[in-house]
Amino acid sequence: MSGAAPAFERTEWCAFLNRMLEAERAGARALLEFLGEYPRDGEAWKALRKVQGDEAHNCVLLGELLKRAGEPYSHATGEFLDKALAVQGRRARLEFLCRGLGWSVREIEAALPRVPEEAGVKALPRIRDTHRGSLASCNALLKSKDLA
């Protein structure tokens, strides 16, 4: 027998998807607040708006996976939102966002060997990759003068 991780059981799979959905929703909502701290249509605003759009799109992808599994999706927002909004200052908020994106990448990578369906095998790497791109954008902002 190989050392491959067993596939998620249906309830475990759906719980994972709902937890990720709640986290994505929290990130998307936090970013809407963060955007108000930047000049509209400035380079930093545009970069964060793209990250926010990716987070919102990821919510749709996760919702579709839950629908496919026959599971109602959670309407809750993850605890990341309150934590992110409690952080003060552009730089600190962006660093906190990077930690959240990194958490999501790690969670998805850990789950990938256990994904029970082809749709998930396609969608989860896409979500992970958008987070990697978002991390790169946020790290570039952290190096820019737009946080002064």
Image (cartoon, rainbow, N blue to C red):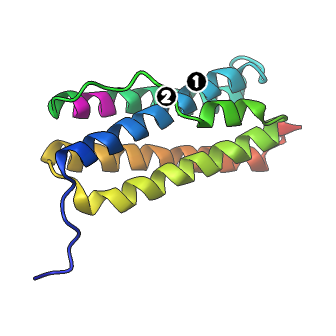
Q: Residues within 10 Å of mark 2 (few under 14, many from 20)?
A: many
Snapshot quadrant of residue 56: top left
Q: What amino acid does circle 1 point to?
A: Arg
Q: Which residues are magenta?
A: 61-66
The circle on residue 127 is none
Residue under the point 39% across and 33% down: 58
- Residue 124 covered by magenta stretch: no
The circle on residue 29 is 1
Report x, y in % for residue 100: 59, 46
Q: Which residue is mark 2?
A: 25
Q: Which element carries disc 2, helix, strand or loop?
A: helix
Q: Residues within 10 Å of mark 1 (few under 14, many from 20)?
A: some
- Using residue 61 as the reference point, say whether residue 133 is left or right of it: right
Residue under the point 89% across and 37% down: 148
Question: What whole-number distance in Å separates the C-alpha atoms at marks 1 and 2?
Answer: 6 Å
Q: What amino acid does circle 2 point to?
A: Arg
Looking at the image, residue 95 lies above or below residue 47: below
Residue under the point 69% across and 21% down: 33
